Amino acid sequence: MNAGEAARPRGGFEGRLEAELVRVVTERGAARPEAARPAWRRQPGQVERAAGWLLRSPGLARALVTTPSLLLPWLVASAGVLAAGAAATLGTRQPWVGLLAPVVAAAGIAYAYGPGIDPAWELSRSLAVSDRLVLLVRALAVFALDAGLGLAACVASGAAVGITFGWLVPMTALCALALAVATVSRSANAGVAAAAGGWALMILSEQAATGRFAAAVTGSGLVVPYLAFAVICVAVALYATRIPREVS
Amino acid sequence: MNIEVAGVTRRFGRTQAVAGVDLEAGPGVLGLLGPNGAGKTSLLRMLATVIPPSSGRLRLLGRDPRGYARRKEIRRRLGYLPQNLGYYPGFTVAEFVEYFALLKEMPPASVPAAVAVAVDRTGLSDQARAKLRTLSGGMLRRAGIAQAIVNQPDLLLLDEPTAGLDPEQRVAFRGLLRELGQNSTVIVSTHLVEDVGAACARVALMDAGRIVFHGTPAELTARADGTDAAGDAPLERGYSAVLAAARTGAGARS
């Protein structure tokens, strides 16, 4: 730091101590040549550069590539779970990929961004790139990537076309639920728990009602309720991240 | 005026954190003093556009922060150090400062130089490539200050900036504050009266959600004259005298 001008003079031992500290700091500052400043520069990776071009915002791109649930270990874990699901589907002829993919994506969404997962959340609410925009971009990216992984796993497992796409709608609803709970509770773990619990309840209740294990992803009558539920959850998440204009 | 606050209140449930504050500030360093729970942090969070006021009028850098576009313009020219700075343990100091420079929408071409300057001004050049998880509390605080000043803000809000700094770092930081205050409006919330005495041209003292004194450090010191107010330094005695007067109903603004 540069010491700048001297502190206001104060009497007694405290004043002398402060004056001595000012002298030491000033001398150190003067002895430090400006040329010694490190020429620091970080080279953005290809993904970040592409995201920056696509989003027209280097800040948003940087926020995107630092998403916890888009980091390599997380992606490897997600791919592993879906690969296991594909293997189970091949072995049992039950749509395990369709049943697993929504929970995998919901966990990714819960860990994408928010007060429970982002350490600098308070600071992020004072920045020009709004926290909502970061949340939206990260959530969409996680959703798209997990949907891609799920589709690849479905193709690998040789599932029927109807089942292949049947889980996308419940996945949307479950992701919205995870997002809403994680945002409201300020806990990513709560978001994951709500999504996993909700999905387990859904599967069990559909099995009880229809006798079919996979009815939660194959029942066409559930599409509208799933979408309506997703809309409600997204509205809750938007409400929880709003900046109210008046009394709160 | 970079800050115009009129009748601003802020309520959290049943708690009245800020109970009607009027404040105007132009370039210079303003120290915000007060006991715990006085409302300093809530006022600072409103000035940082993190939370809105419950009522009252707020204009920052000549703009009303309620509109999205105007709020964004304010935020581009704002520096903020929260009381509890969250950080990313895996980031280096330079990456941390750069991250916020980009999210403040600084032109990308100017970011590397701005990061180097901010890191240098906070004395962290030697730690620029160190991971944040390896830094001491004082160094983390300085990294927080570096991200706050990286965009050379017109309005700089610092909540307890000297917490965790050693005496030498605090002296250097006060020099930095005076330097920044020459062109910007700097508001420093602190418990440390000596920081205010050394670095602030003006001081506001808050108690129970209100500003009970606004003037120069010398005027605050003079408030202790003729009283038996407690304190080890003249400014501390002025602080105690104003608080005592405010709590007995005799307090008044300078």
Image: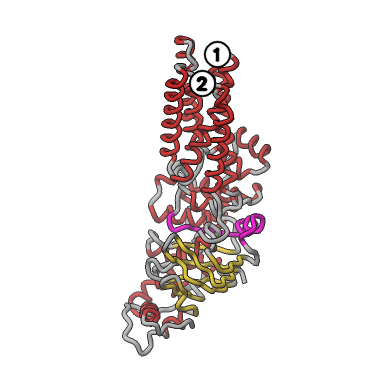
The answer to whether the residue labelled 2 contacts the one labelled 1, judged by CB atoms less than 8 Å apart, is: yes
Residue A235: quadrant of the picture: top right
Residue B220: quadrant of the picture: bottom left
Task: Judge whether B27 appears above or below A56 on screen.
Answer: below
Tell which of B31 and A126 is nearer to you.
A126
Q: Write the residue at 57% across / 55% down.
A: B150
**Can residue A22 be seen at all in this image of the molecule?**
yes
What residue is disc 1 on? Answer: A159
Disc 2/disc 1 C-alpha distance (Å) = 9 Å
Q: Look at the image and give the residue range highlighted in magenta.
A: B65-84
Q: Tell me: A56 left or right of A10.
A: right
| Callout 2 amino acid | Gly
Mark closer to the chain start, 2 or 1: 2
Task: Judge whether B113 appears above or below A202 on screen.
Answer: below
Tell which of B246 and B24 is nearer to you.
B246
Residue B126 image point, x, y percent = 47, 50
Q: Does residue B72 belong to the magenta stretch?
A: yes
Residue B73 image point, x, y percent = 65, 57
What residue is disc 2 on? Answer: A98
Give me the chain letter of mark 2.
A
Task: Judge whether A232 appears above or below B20 on screen.
Answer: above
> Of helix, strand and loop, which one carries label 2?
helix
Give me the chain letter of mark 1.
A
Q: Write the residue at 57% across / 26% down.
A: A168
